[in-house]
């Protein structure tokens, strides 16, 4: 195992729907995505003290527990998580993730996101 964390920060709509196009044509994350990303990063840093960068191919396991009845697409959630993993330097680039196990969990659990990276 390279990395493992259970996050309590509720998931918002992520991915392409949380980017805006600036006047100069640059795509930038909107304020809701920035706020979510900052909260998730702070939660990760509060739970894990010694993060190391993995530079090889890996497998991502991601369990998502919805906090409401809104539909959210898997690719948007994955995109947001990839962005966080790159930002905290657990991985250099999301192209390192070669396998993905994504599941929406409707059982009563104590997290909104469970994220795990394993070497392959």
Image (cartoon, rainbow, N blue to C red):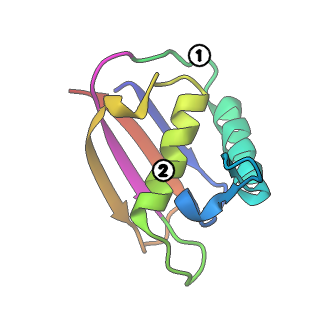
Magenta stretch: dominant secondary structure: strand
> As drawn, which residue projects farthest toward the front?
24
Q: Which quarter of the rendered picture does the C terminus lie within?
A: top left
Residue 60 visible:
yes
Residue 90 in picture, x, y percent from top left: 50, 24
Residue 28 included in the magenta stretch of the image: no
**Left or right of residue 3, residue 111 in this image:** right
Q: Do labels 1 and 2 touch, CB within 8 Å?
A: no
Residue at 48% of width from left, 16% of height from top? 53
> As drawn, which residue projects farthest toward the left?
120
Residue 68 in picture, x, y percent from top left: 60, 79
Magenta region: which residues? 55-64
Residue at 59% of width from left, 49% of height from top? 7
Residue receiving disc 1:
50
- Depth check, mark 1 against mark 2: the one in front is 2
Residue 75 in picture, x, y percent from top left: 41, 59
In the image, is residue 89 above or below residue 21?
above
Residue at 77% of width from left, 51% of height from top? 35
Residue 110 visible:
no
Q: SS class of the residue under badge 2?
A: helix
Q: Which quarter of the rendered picture does the N terminus lie within?
A: top left
In the image, is residue 102 above or below residue 90?
below
Residue 26 in picture, x, y percent from top left: 67, 46
In the image, is residue 99 above or below residue 118?
below
Residue receiving disc 2:
79
Name which of mark 1 and mark 2 comes first in the sequence: 1
**Left or right of residue 58, residue 62 in this image:** right
Residue at 30% of width from left, 18% of height from top? 56
Q: SS class of the residue under badge 1?
A: loop
Q: Residues within 10 Å of mark 1 (few under 14, many from 20)?
A: few
């Amino acid at each position: 195992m390279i990395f493992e964390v259970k996050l309590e920060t509720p998931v918002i709509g992520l991915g392409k729907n949380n980017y805006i196009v600036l006047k100069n044509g640059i795509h930038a994350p909107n304020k809701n995505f920035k706020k979510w990303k900052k909260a998730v990063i702070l939660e990760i840093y509060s739970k894990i003290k010694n993060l190391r960068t993995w530079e090889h191919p890996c497998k991502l396991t991601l369990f998502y527990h919805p906090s409401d009845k809104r539909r959210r697409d898997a690719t948007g959630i994955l995109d947001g998580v990839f962005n966080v993993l790159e930002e905290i330097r657990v991985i250099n680039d999301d192209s390192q993730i070669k396998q993905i196990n994504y599941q929406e969990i409707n059982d009563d659990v104590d997290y909104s996101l469970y994220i795990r990276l394993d070497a392959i």
